[in-house]
Image (cartoon, rainbow, N blue to C red):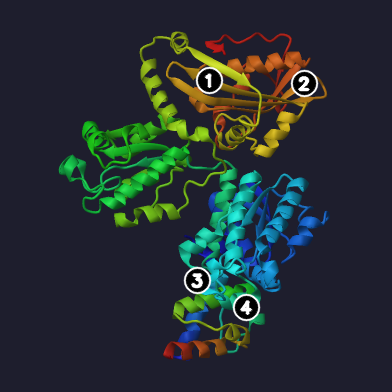
Amino acid sequence: MLSFNQLKRNLKKDFNTFKKIRVSILAEDSSQLLVQAIKGYGFELGYNIEINECGYNEVNLQVFEPNSQLHSFPSDFVVIVPSTQKLLKKFYSRSHAERITFADGHLLYIESLTQTLDERSDAKIIFCNFLEINDGVFGNYSSKVEASFLFQLRKINFELMRLAQKTPNVFINDLLSLQIQFGTPFIIDNKFYVNSDITFSIDFLPHVAKNLLDVVKSVDGKIKKCLILDLDNTLWGGVIGDDGVEGIQIGDLGVGKAFTELQLWAKQLKERGIILAVCSKNTDDIAKEPFNIHPDMILKLDDIAVFVANWENKVDNIKHIQSVLNIGFDSMVFVDDNPFERNLVAENIEGITVPDMPEDPADYLSFLRSLNLFETASFTEGDSVRTNQYQDEAKRIVYRKHFANEGEYLSGLTMVAKIEGFNKFNIPRISQLTQRSNQFNLRAKRYTEKEIEKFSNSEKHVCLLFALNDKFGDHGLIAVVIGELKSSNELFIDTWLMSCRVLKRGMEGFVLNRIVGRAKQLCCKKVIGEYIPTSKNNIVANHYKDLGFEKAGEYWELDVESFEEHKMYIDKE
Amino acid sequence: MSIEEIIKEVNSIFIDVLDNDEIVVQHETISDEIEEWDSLNHIQLVVAIEKHFKIRFTAAEIVNFNNVGEMCVAIKIKIAS
């Protein structure tokens, strides 16, 4: 982790080319150092974070007063940093009878804060949970006393999670987990708390900033989607080619527990929707043997979306994995015990994350957990079937080689598309797609569930959602279009994003046919498109041109009247 | 370690933390004389000095130092004990 001093030096660097993110900070303690740490850590992530530091211990005033400094600033995020010490004082001022309902009362207050913020702006709210203080009044007996501070404090932290679950715009910066990881003496320097009301120690500040920006980053769509694993001495102890399937350490053999638990973790990630891939220097059938026959292997071959074991170099192999998965290198994590391989990959593949693994396999798992690599801003149940979809894709790549021309291949796929509007079942996934899709995304607008819901209820908006399946499997939801009706008989395409898995299937034309169809129903004369370049969406730079739109200044226009439907290999369900 | 040696080491900590190679501190130097030495940077300086000499200041000490020399005397006593 970078030191606070390093983060502070970043402040003198040039942020001009970075994406601007506006963050309001509402802190109950002195927040000047925290602000420097956040801004400085932003540099590391390529963000120009503009901070609106709203007074000191003025949370109420800033939130409830309509003309406050908070509300006069166009925040993307509002961060609330409460103080456990201040909570404790408030608690002590209550009578014994009142203390039993202290948490409930405080939660109502927090809810009124988040509700007011939610009503007054579209900013995402990041609430830091409370650091824990056992005030030592009841000792271990606190647990048996509902009116103890510890009981009420833990209740607040627990219920905050529930509040975040029912309020899509509220996220938690889980400082409590950091406190558990680092310990109270590390995170609080009492003398600065006493002298200056500064809670977080200098050494803890970079961790707070990172954890906070992990949330910001994931809301902004910068997330990890794939974990690439080495095999020998990474997923099991020993070398399969030398030790044989009975000799590798997994399960009860040797230090096998370390590897078993790492596999359990990887399996959980897979079930959450992270794609697992294998990249190993090995002979293919030998490398697969433990997956097929070792009783203690947690990971099975069908957990692995792309399995590459050969003697080529890992840079080329990871590039191959990337081409099958069609996701950015910056969404991939490569875990390998060998420093040489790590170095080679880190130096030759820009953007990929390569954790600097500890020497002892016993430390692997706690180290990887502590990096918080797989932060996410959404979770839907469909996430867990993603591996199957990528395995299906690998089969399609093989199938395609049988056909001489594109048309034959496409009609052979027997594709069927389903079109629907937005509803409460698909809104979470739609919001997630707007946050995750980077490449095929014409304007890269990120929307929360709340915003998507607004579109779905608006008469001024056309909301289309497409799902696709073919003979190899179900792609799930693969395209989202949000059109906005402009007064001048024009339909403006606010959002058009598609999954890169369905590129070159004729889906672009299919979607356009639907858009124009809706435009006609709504008596629009023109469909207007716009391409806003980002660092990732170059692949759709010519999207509108290729579909027959005419350039009109910054925009692209399509005449509804003279539009001829695109030829399709996709049937409508 | 002599006070002079301590002042020399403290000087390089000032240079590092305040990110200014020109800083020269002496026994009598007070915070008003160094532009970057404000109350926020003071916190960072104290932490860096604590780490460097492996000592801990008390809350009262860090607000009561009148100049660099007094701080270095406190450092000297703490290293010795």
Kind of residue indicated by mark 4: Val
Q: Is residue A514 visible?
A: yes
Instruction: Using the image, tell me which numbered label, if any, was put on residue A140.
Output: 3
Instruction: Using the image, tell me which numbered label, if any, was put on residue A194.
Output: 4
Question: Which residue is nearer to you in this view: B75 or A198?
Answer: A198
Measured in 3D between alpha carbons, the distance from the residue under mark 4 to the one under mark 3, in whole angstroms, is 27 Å
Percent across and percent down for residue A555 are: 71, 26
Q: Is residue A213 above or below residue B70?
A: above
Residue depicted at 29% across the width and 52% down the height: A257
Q: Which residue is mark 2?
A: A490
Residue depicted at 44% across the width and 55% down the height: A370
Measured in 3D between alpha carbons, the distance from the residue under mark 1 to the one under mark 3, in whole angstroms, is 57 Å
Question: Which residue is nearer to you in this view: A220 or A182?
Answer: A182
Q: Which residue is mark 1?
A: A468
Q: Residue A398 is drawn in which quadrant?
A: top left
Q: What is the chain letter for disc 1?
A: A
Residue depicted at 50% across the width and 35% down the height: A383
